[in-house]
Image (cartoon, grey):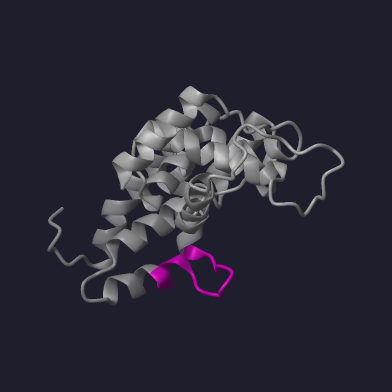
């Protein structure tokens, strides 16, 4: 498909339904999700009313009516509708044994906040609050776990860009992030306190700047 080609509604469905279905099946296949499942769920999304009262078809037609057409928004909406906000994530949670409501998804702003925190000389890497700590204190377990996630993303991507890091954290490559809220509520620890790890983190931060 040419990036300058203007798509009709039917052409857009003919292109994006197979593409998104294959992508979802590849990402969630280990949890029993097939391309056929994804295609069926996409049609349900297209024909059903969403939380805002609009059907998927209405959203698609709106994105296609823009100049230029908002094809990236269209594709992402399809992926989210049956992926992390829909059927595929429910299947993953059922097989993996956690609740969808427990999953925390990273946004670029979340990541930017964590990067700022990690650059603070006063951040206690590797620490964990004691049971007597104020639950509203800055270094609580969820915050420490999020910081640990972002540090791991820095080391894997060697990028300091919040969008890149958030994408990695929410992607299959960073599948630990999908369960981070569950872990943080029970046993998660910021395990990033060694001098070697901090040095590697600082290198990744400087490389991404």
Residue 71 x %, y %: 28, 62
Q: 109 and 63: which one is in front?
A: 109
Q: Which region of the structure is painted magenta?
A: 47-59
Residue 186: in magenta span: no
Query: Height in image: 33 above or below 162?
Result: above
Residue 98 x %, y %: 69, 36
Is residue 58 toward the left or the right of residue 53 in the image?
A: left
Is residue 200 toward the left or the right of residue 136 in the image?
A: left
Q: 115 and 92: which one is in front?
A: 115
Q: Is residue 27 visible?
A: no
Is residue 206 toward the left or the right of residue 105 in the image?
A: left
Name which quarter of the figure residue 46 lies in: bottom left
Q: Main secondary structure of the magenta part?
A: loop
Write the residue at 48% across / 58% down.
109
Residue 50 x %, y %: 55, 67
Query: Height in image: 189 above or below 142?
Result: above
| Number of numbered callouts drawn | 0
Residue 22 x %, y %: 36, 39
View extreme (front): residue:
121
Q: 155 and 76: which one is in front?
A: 155
Write the residue at 51% across / 25% down.
195
Name which quarter of the figure residue 191 lies in: top right
Residue 54: in magenta span: yes
Q: Is residue 143 visible?
A: yes
Write the residue at 64% across / 46% down.
143
Query: Height in image: 207 above or below 109?
Result: above
Write the residue at 46% across / 54% down.
112
């Amino acid at each position: 498909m040419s990036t300058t080609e203007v798509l009709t509604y039917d052409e857009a469905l003919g292109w994006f339904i197979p593409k998104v279905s294959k992508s979802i099946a590849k990402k969630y296949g280990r949890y029993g999700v097939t391309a056929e499942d994804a295609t069926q769920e996409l049609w349900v999304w297209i024909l059903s009313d969403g939380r805002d009262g609009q059907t998927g078809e209405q959203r698609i037609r709106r994105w296609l009516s823009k100049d230029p057409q908002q094809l990236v928004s269209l594709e992402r909406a399809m992926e989210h509708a049956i992926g992390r906000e829909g059927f595929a994530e429910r299947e993953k949670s059922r097989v993996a044994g956690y609740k969808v409501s427990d999953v925390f998804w990273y946004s670029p702003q979340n990541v930017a906040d964590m990067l700022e925190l990690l650059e603070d000389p006063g951040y206690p890497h590797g620490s964990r609050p004691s049971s007597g700590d104020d639950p509203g204190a800055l270094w609580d377990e969820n915050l420490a776990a999020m910081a640990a996630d972002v540090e791991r993303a820095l080391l894997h991507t060697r990028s300091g860009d919040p969008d890149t890091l958030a994408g990695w954290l929410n992607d299959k490559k960073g599948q630990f992030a999908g369960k981070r809220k569950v872990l943080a509520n029970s046993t998660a620890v910021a395990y990033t306190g060694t001098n070697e790890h901090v040095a590697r983190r600082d290198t990744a931060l400087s490389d991404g700047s």
